[in-house]
Amino acid sequence: MKKTARTLLVVASLILTGGISTMANAQSQTPAASDTAAKQPSRAQQLYGDIAPKMVELTDNVLYGDIWERPGLSKRDRSLVTITALIALNRPDQLRSHINIGLQNGLTQDEIVETITHMAFYSGWPSAVSSLAIAKEVFQKK
């Protein structure tokens, strides 16, 4: 339980400090760093490698290579937690990416919509309405 709480605190601190915001746009999936190292450059490397190599390293190795690979939560659950945090923080650009990742990680459209509806009462109606528009856009592209 303490490990799960610690993991959630780390993820929350990354979100609150903006560390997770580039991560959402930097990856279209959540592969382990070792999976991407042998293949083509990661999304983070493609987007920021020329100007922010340390951010790429942290995104690929720490965030996706460690945090997303920890056994305390499934990737599906991590996606749900991340989507919830992004709704609460009203981070639409990152939410779009993480809704896609959540669908890849096993979340259903109904679960995502229910999460947004639930969050309307905790993070505000405007944030939920904006999130629904983003979810609808993502779902229509699938």
Image (cartoon, rainbow, N blue to C red):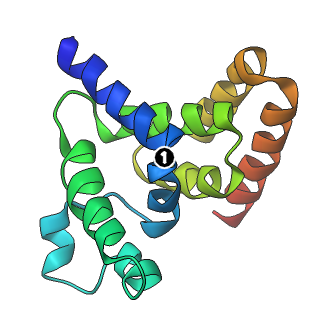
Instruction: State whether residue 128 appears in this view.
Output: yes
Q: Is residue 46 above or below residue 54?
A: below
Q: Quadrant of the C terminus?
A: bottom right
Q: Please rate how many residues cluster around mark 1, counting C-alpha atoms within 10 Å: few if below 14, some from 14 to 19, many from 20.
A: many
Q: Residue at x 48, y 33 (%)?
A: 80
Tell me if 81 is positioned left or right of 55 in this view: right
**Where does residue 67 sit, x and y in percent of width and height?**
25, 43
**Where residue 6 sits in the image (x, y, percent)?**
26, 23
Give the quarter of the figure containing the N terminus. top left
Residue 41 at x, y = what percent?
Answer: 29, 84
**In the drawing, does residue 1 fall left or right of residue 142?**
left
Residue placed furthest toward the top: 1
Of residues 97 and 20, the one nearer the viewer is 20
Q: Position of residue 14 (x, y in %)?
A: 42, 42
Q: Is residue 69 above or below residue 48?
A: above
Secondary structure of the residue carrying numbered label 1: helix
Taking the spot 82% from the left edge, 43% from the top edge, the residue there is 130
Residue pictured at 80% horizontal, 23% vertical: 124
**Can residue 107 be seen here?**
no
Q: Residue at x 32, y 61 (%)?
A: 59
Three-letter amino acid code of the residue under disc 1? Gly
Left or right of 125? Residue 36 is: left
Circle 1 residue: 102
> Which of the pair 116/16 is nearer the observer?
16
Count of numbered badges drawn on the protein = 1
Q: Quadrant of residue 87?
A: top right
Near-viewer residue (88 or 79): 88
